[in-house]
Image (cartoon, rainbow, N blue to C red):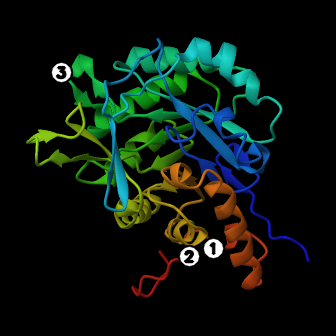
Amino acid sequence: MVKPDLSVALGPLRLKNPVIAASGTFGYGTEFLPFLDLSELGGLVVKGLSLEPRVGNPPPRIVETPAGMLNAIGLQNVGVDAFVREKLPALAGYDTVVLANVFGETEEEYALACARLDGAPGLGAIELNVSCPNTEAGGMIFGNDPIALGRVTRACRRSTRLPLLVKLSPNVTDIREGARAAEAEGADALSLVNTFVGMAVDVDRRRPVLANVAGGLSGPAIRPLAVWMTWQASRAVKIPVVGMGGILTARDALEFILAGASAVQVGTANFIQPDACIRVIRGLEDHLTSRGLSSIREIVGTLETGEGRRS
């Protein structure tokens, strides 16, 4: 029996299948070698990279929540230069697309980080994490202001020839505004959603559980919200959308795909089942085969909403 075609395109970026390991949950890729073959993945996004190394926040910085988790790691990373020199070469032997997630505190930091990654051997694309405070604007989050989001996207687009994805924050009034701003300034695709801001309280100590007070909520608890925002964003732009948020199984992934996502990212599930991405890939193959479908692309955005048209 011929296997269904799982290949997808995110603008100029080609993936053998639509399943990508999400940033912040997959280390630099090699940490998962004992559990799976990286070459089976459509792609992997390494943990967020800044111009200079960061030690992150003090512990405690992770706490479980009902159907999810809060994290306040603080974007701990080795820095762009060390990544290119030490981490990226270790991925060269694997047939998967490597994406670098990038963040900064100013437009210049974002642009410089992208420029240093441009042309790095083996790097397939850059994903911008815009859920970071803009220190030049008094701490306003880049992704919460469509104008600031557009400016940082434009600066990064000018700094790299690599395919550029913008990872949208869900902590906004209307996800479509940021989606349109990123598209207008040269993003090749969007990825959404990043984590929701949340808080857990130790009622015995009357203190926040996390040393940072607040953290990013991820896991199955956010999936309905993420699917809704993916559906909204996919209808608002012409560029491809990558959906994420609480995907544990192929059926979860299919919710996003039917809602308009060309690909998906698997995040928190990697902490529960290190081979979660492979399970999702196999499940997508089985779903298409059981329905006599030859390609995953046949079902992208085919959600029937009852409005008399396909959304």
Q: Is residue 238 visible?
A: no
Mark 3 touches mark 2? (CB < 8 Å): no
Rendered location of residue 220, percent (x, y)? 41, 62
Mark 3, residues whose alpha carbon is within 10 Å: few (<14), some, or many (≥20)?
Answer: few
Mark 1 touches mark 2? (CB < 8 Å): yes
Residue at which label 3 appears: 138
Residue at 79%, 65% (x, y): give it: 5
Q: Tell me which numbered mark, 3 or 2, is placed earlier along the sequence.
A: 3
SS at circle 3: loop
Residue 236 vertical placement versus 134 (above, below):
below
Spatial CA span between label 1 and label 2: 5 Å
Mark 1, residues whose alpha carbon is within 10 Å: few (<14), some, or many (≥20)?
Answer: some
Residue at which label 1 appears: 299
Q: Is 282 left, or right, of 183 in this rendering?
A: right
Residue 252 vertical placement versus 214 (above, below):
below
Residue type of the residue flagged with mark 3: Gly
Nearer-the-camera pick, 25 or 152? 25
Mark 3 or 2: the one toward you = 3
Residue at which label 2 appears: 302
Tell me the quarter of the image containing the N terminus. bottom right
Residue type of the residue flagged with mark 2: Thr
Residue 232 vertical placement versus 36 (above, below):
below
